Image (cartoon, rainbow, N blue to C red):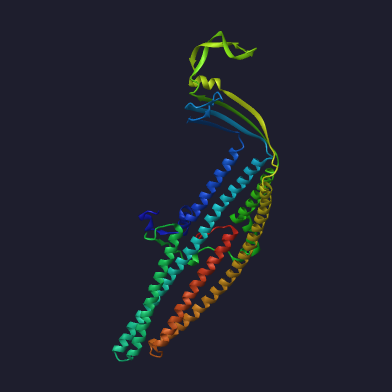
Amino acid sequence: MATAGRAQDKWSLEQCVAYAVSHNISVKQADVQARVDRLTLEQSKAALYPTANTQHSMGYQFGRSIDPTSNQFTTNEILFANHSVNVNADLFNWFRKRNTVAANDFAYEASVARFDKARNDVALNVANAYLAALLSKEQINAARVQLQQSREQRDNVNKQVEAGALPELNLAEMETQLANDSATLINARADLRLRLLQLQALLNLDAADAFDVQSPPVDSIPVEPLAELEPAVVFTSALENLPQQKINELNVKAAVKNVLAAKAAMYPSIGLFGGLDSRYSNAQKLLPSNYQDGVLPIGFVDINGTNYVVNSKEKIPTGFTKNTYFRQLSNNFSQNLGISLSVPIFNGHQARTGWKKAKLNVESQQLSQEQDAQTLKQDIYQAHTNAVAAIEKYNAARIAVTSAQKAYDFARKRFEVGLLKPIDLITNQNNLFKAKINMLSAQYDYVFKLKLLEFYKGHGIKLHH
């Protein structure tokens, strides 16, 4: 937001453009999108490297369950913990990830160009609004001169009416003209305020802030000769310089890379995996530490009606140690390493459909590029035609002002010697005022249309050398 002190200054077009491209919301949005696309690019580059993840879980189980360390059924309440580390790496996937990186790289460059386009669009809109404000100021000056002339004529007629040389009807006619000219000045001032508000909105300035613009004479605004702004030359330059054309070209390149990435999804891929794993359970609290030989009965055998005990020699534990948390992690520690092969067989035609959509997107982007080029060419030729018409209109308006000025000068002289009625003088005065306003409008119109051609040519928008 501009400071109060700066808001009191009169802004030049260069200041307005510089402030707008830094504070306009649409420009900020384009900048945010460019940063988002940059993050997408960085993430796709990082995806080229192996992935490593560690997982840890701890829980409490009860009822009939399996002891996670012994794999035996138990009804004991068990506190358990699992820990693992897994690594995965793509060995070969038909360059899917590399093509995705390339596509995201082109998409990011397109976003940067789109940011430049947003800046250019704002600059052009600011210049248009700025010139409209200058025209309003010129209209205020013309209306002020008109009002001053009407006031002087009213005073002159009033003196003659008081002297009895003219009827009161003439004074009433002059009073009406004075009121109309006052309303014209008020409307011109209101129009300027609206123009300035529109410019403030483009600059993202608070509408309540004091704001005004510098008023360079329209004759001092530099414009290239129309001969140097031939539409064919301007169009060739526009194709090379305007961001929209770069955006389209980059979008096509990104779409082509996305086709290759989508096609890779239809082929087998080879990967490498590895992992570390261990677990803990408080159900296994003790571990045997010492053994002795012993005999344990394992059943009975019936021989001729007599049961004989069947014994088995076993190692019988005689000492125990605590099976601690870290001891269990060490005893249960396992590793795995291998190669994986993923072969797409049937997945609802998702991969093939994605590939076909990617190819259609290339066609769509190419058509958009062609359409934008056609639209650009049409806009440039139309702008050139409008510029030619605007210059001719301005030249005609200058002649009209010269003629209206002569007519008014003659009418005023005749009025001053009593040979012309006030209403006829008013008519000539209004004709002169309308001719001046038309000339100003035509002049600013042709200046902007030439500036528009300069913009297409890649020279930017400037009101000073």
The answer to whether residue 111 is left or right of residue 198 is: right
The vertical placement of 48 against 136, above or below, is above
Instruction: Give the image location of residue 385, x and y in percent.
Output: 61, 69
* Residue at x-position 29% and y-position 88%: 162
**Quadrant assignment, res 264:** top right
The vertical placement of 389 against 270, above or below, is below
> Can see residue 242?
no
The answer to whether residue 208 is left or right of residue 446 is: left
Outermost top residue:
293
Outermost left residue:
162
**Quadrant assignment, res 178:** bottom left
The vertical placement of 64 against 47, above or below, is above
> Can see residue 207?
yes
Instruction: Give the image location of residue 141, x and y in percent.
Output: 41, 71
Instruction: Give the image location of residue 70, x and y in percent.
Output: 55, 23
Tally of numbered discs? 0
The answer to whether residue 175 is left or right of residue 46 is: left
Choose between 226 and 61: the one closer to the eye: 61
Instruction: Give the image location of residue 279, x and y in percent.
Output: 53, 25
Choose between 28 and 3: the one closer to the eye: 28
* Residue at x-position 61% and y-position 53%: 247
* Residue at x-position 65% and y-position 50%: 255
The vertical placement of 14 against 148, above or below, is above
Choose between 58 and 310: the one closer to the eye: 310
